[in-house]
């Protein structure tokens, strides 16, 4: 809740009841486990990651798709009338992406002033746990954030990053289209005695991603993972 900076959990119980609560009890093999949401901290409160602020009324999928498409079309004109609905279905996919073994990304390509940043921003508002990046963040920040929160990574001006096949950014993006995609890093951990040691740990890179830029990356494997719409200046 951005008004009072409090967190809650949304839930659906075994009887189908949907609601939100300060905590949720889950019974696992006869043992009760109580889960609490993380309290909002600066990364959340300043909008770097965007959580849903409330539960909306229940509407059927067709109405939801049309509502999302209308939200996208409010400020943008598309040459292909089906594209806003493709984007709407892609947005819905972000809310259950972990049910798939592979996903595609959404990419907006266009010159400066064509509205591509605003389009990706508007789409990002609707996606599951939007993680915002301006392309200046390091790959380490991003894959650690993905591993911690899941969510949908939105990168503005992705083509301003290193984009050849040896780039760590490209490796994170390419591996993140498939379930099980990880990047391995040496990380300092403490053993049972409190001593620090370096151990290799895998960080997941699998999540939906929205990209915008003025040019294609040098690696065509990334392009092949994307649904691409071209933004024009009018």
Image (cartoon, helix red, strand yellow):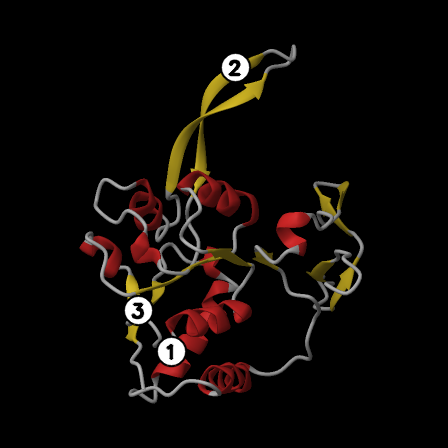
Residue 42 x/y as whole percent: 66, 49
3D distance between C-alphas at marks 1 and 3: 9 Å
Task: Assess disc 3: are there few (<14), some (14-19) or many (≥20) residues with their C-alpha within 10 Å of its C-alpha.
Answer: some
Q: Earlier in the sequence, mark 1 or mark 2?
A: 1
Q: What residue is disc 2 on?
A: 197
Q: What residue is disc 3 on?
A: 227
Residue 9 x/y as whole percent: 72, 57
* In front of the other: 154 or 118: 118
SS at mark 3? strand
SS at mark 2? strand
SS at mark 1? helix
Work out which quarter of the rendered image holds the N terminus and state it: bottom right
Residues at marks 2 and 3 touching, judged by CB atoms closer than 8 Å = no
Of tags 1 and 2, the one toward the viewer is 2
Residue at the front extreme, as displayed: 113
Residues at marks 1 and 3 touching, judged by CB atoms closer than 8 Å = yes
Q: Residue at x 69, y 48 (%)?
A: 41
Would you say 80 lies left or right of 199 here?
left
Locate residue 49: give its quadrant: bottom right
Residue 101 x/y as whole percent: 38, 54
Would you say 191 lies left or right of 40 here?
left
- Tag of residue 86: 1
Residue 50 x/y as whole percent: 60, 60
Work out which quarter of the rendered image holds the C terminus and state it: bottom left
3D distance between C-alphas at marks 2 and 3: 43 Å
- Tag of residue 28: none
Task: Assess disc 2: are there few (<14), some (14-19) or many (≥20) residues with their C-alpha within 10 Å of its C-alpha.
Answer: few
Q: Earlier in the sequence, mark 1 or mark 3?
A: 1
3D distance between C-alphas at marks 1 and 2: 48 Å
Would you say 105 lies left or right of 132 here?
left
Q: Residue at x 21, y 54 (%)?
A: 221
Q: Residue at x 28, y 59 (%)?
A: 225
């Amino acid at each position: 809740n951005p008004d009072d900076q409090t967190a809650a959990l949304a839930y659906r119980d075994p009887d189908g009841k949907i609601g939100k609560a300060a905590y949720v009890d889950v019974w696992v093999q006869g043992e009760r486990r109580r889960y609490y949401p993380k309290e909002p901290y600066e990364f959340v409160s300043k909008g770097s990651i965007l959580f849903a602020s409330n539960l909306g009324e229940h509407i059927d999928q067709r109405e939801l798709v049309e509502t999302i498409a209308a939200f996208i079309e409010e400020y943008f004109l598309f040459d292909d009338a089906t594209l806003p609905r493709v984007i709407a279905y892609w947005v819905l996919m972000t809310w259950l992406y972990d049910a798939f073994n592979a996903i595609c990304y959404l990419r907006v390509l266009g010159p400066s002033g064509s509205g591509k940043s605003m389009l990706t921003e508007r789409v990002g508002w609707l996606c599951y746990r939007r993680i915002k990046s301006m392309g200046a963040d390091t790959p380490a920040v991003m894959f650690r954030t993905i591993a911690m929160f899941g969510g949908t990574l939105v990168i503005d001006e992705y083509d301003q990053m290193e984009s050849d096949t040896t780039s760590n950014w490209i490796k994170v993006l390419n591996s993140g289209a498939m379930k099980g995609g990880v990047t391995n890093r040496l990380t300092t951990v403490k053993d049972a005695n409190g001593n620090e040691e370096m151990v290799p740990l895998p960080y997941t890179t699998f999540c939906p991603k929205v990209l915008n830029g003025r040019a294609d990356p040098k690696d065509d494997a990334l392009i092949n993972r994307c649904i691409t719409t071209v933004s024009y200046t009018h």
